[in-house]
Amino acid sequence: MKKNIGPVNALYPMPVVLVGAMVDGRANFITIAHVGIFTLETISLGVNRSHYTNRGIRENRTFSVNFPSDGMVVETDYAGLASGKQTDKSSVFEVEFGPLKTAPMIKNAPVSMECGLLDVLDYGNHDVFVGRAVNTYADESVLKNGVIDLAAVRPMLFDMFQRKYWRLGGPFADCWSVGKNYAGGKK
């Protein structure tokens, strides 16, 4: 029997990303897990308004989304602990830029997306940034037949309830295929 545990958002764990933006002329990164897919073309970032990075996203209308591997856990956690208001985080990671010029990306992150800002939604004390990937960059070591191989990326997942980072397991079924085996379905 299931127990009612209240109005808990049970969607965790979520992928951990490092969002980059230029603020006051320097690259700043924040660690967040409130990232989502709006449509195939658009993504969302839920970021508390108190964060320094928000100003850079609003001013430049660009940002990056970087997927750190589990080997980057120390730097990734630090980027979430230290505030860009008091700490210059521009030297925590080696930075590179694409054509947008104001969306700093992390060179050793296996996957980075250079994004343009489409909209900002007001959700109380959070900004929900809606963006579109203009360019996605993947290290050749994480590509398999031209597609990003999650096993090679070794992404981190964030669990709010246990305050832990998790790793992914392997694939176990084929999407849009395994359901064809459902005995109660139409033939």
Image: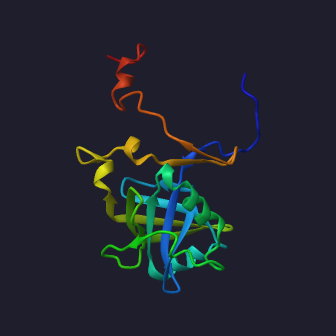
Query: Residue at point 32% right, 56% down?
Result: 139
Residue nearer the viewer, 94 or 20: 94
- Image height of 30 relative to 17, above or below: below
Left or right position of 69 against 11? left
Q: Residue furthest left?
A: 145
Q: Nearer the viewer, residue 52 or 117?
A: 52
Q: Is residue 66 above or below residue 174?
A: below
User: x, y (%) of residue 161?
Assistant: 70, 45
Q: Estimate the x, y position of residue 159 in percent, counting from the top left.
A: 63, 46
- Return the x and y of residue 175 as percentages of the image width and height: 37, 32
Q: Quadrant of residue 97?
A: bottom left
Picture quarter with the N terminus: top right
Q: Is residue 14 left or right of residue 115?
A: right
Q: Quadrant of the C terminus?
A: top left
Q: Is residue 98 above or below residue 181?
A: below
Q: Residue furthest top?
A: 183
State the residue at coordinates (48%, 70%): 20
Instruction: Report the number of numbered marks.
Output: 0
Residue 12: x %, y % from top left: 61, 44
Q: Give the image's coloring scheme.
A: rainbow
Image quadrant in which you'd find residue 166:
top right
> Residue at coordinates 45% horizontally, 63% vertically from top-left?
65
Report which quarter residue 49 is drawn in.
bottom right
Q: Residue furthest bottom?
A: 24
